[in-house]
Amino acid sequence: MEAVGSKVWFIPDGYYSSISNGKLFKSHEAICVLNTGKKDANINITLYFEDRDPMTGFKAVCKSQRTNHIRMDKIKNDKGESVPMDVPYAMMVESDTEIVVQYSRMDTSQPEMALMTTIAYPLK
């Protein structure tokens, strides 16, 4: 199958909470990537904020004909910086080949944990 999707995706509602009551499931976010193409997807992620300059240099790879769940609590940018906690932000996900992007948030800040997921917005 040829690569499907888009090369640029937007996720306007990011929030990495410092509160996590989960023992088995820790609160986290993930950019879920599907690459149906025959070449690896090199991914760059930029974070945008309400009150500060963007953070750049977050990189990941989604292998050819595979998926990659990029955990936002584990990724660091090229300066060694992590995604800040308790700060609303948005994301731009750029790839050198077409991919499909979905966003998920696991919220375990309360005993009744919640999972939210949505398709990202593709730029055509």
Image: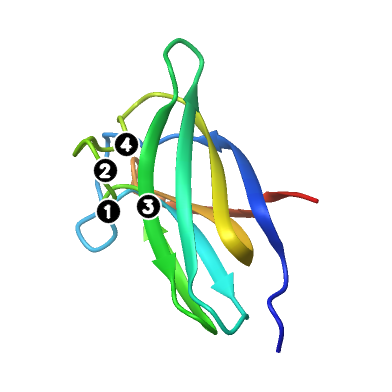
Quote the CA–CA distance across marks 3 and 2.
Answer: 26 Å
Q: Is residue 53 above or below residue 22?
A: above
Left or right, 53 with reference to 78: right
Q: State the image coordinates of residue 46 (x, y, percent, origin top left).
A: 47, 37
Report how many numbered discs are placed on residues in the image. Answer: 4
Front label number (3 vs 1) = 3
Name the residue nearer the viewer: 76 or 73. Answer: 76
Q: Amino acid at mark 4?
A: Val
Circles 1 and 2 in contact, beta carbons < 8 Å: yes
Q: Amino acid at mark 3?
A: Lys
Quote the CA–CA distance across marks 3 and 1.
Answer: 22 Å
Left or right, 109 with reference to 119: left
Q: What element does badge 2 sit on?
A: loop
- Residue at 53% x, 79% y: name it: 39
Q: Amino acid at mark 2?
A: Ser
Give the residue pinned by disc 1. 26
Give the residue pinned by disc 2. 20
Q: Mark 2 or mark 1, which is nearer the start of the sequence?
A: 2
Give the residue pinned by disc 4. 83
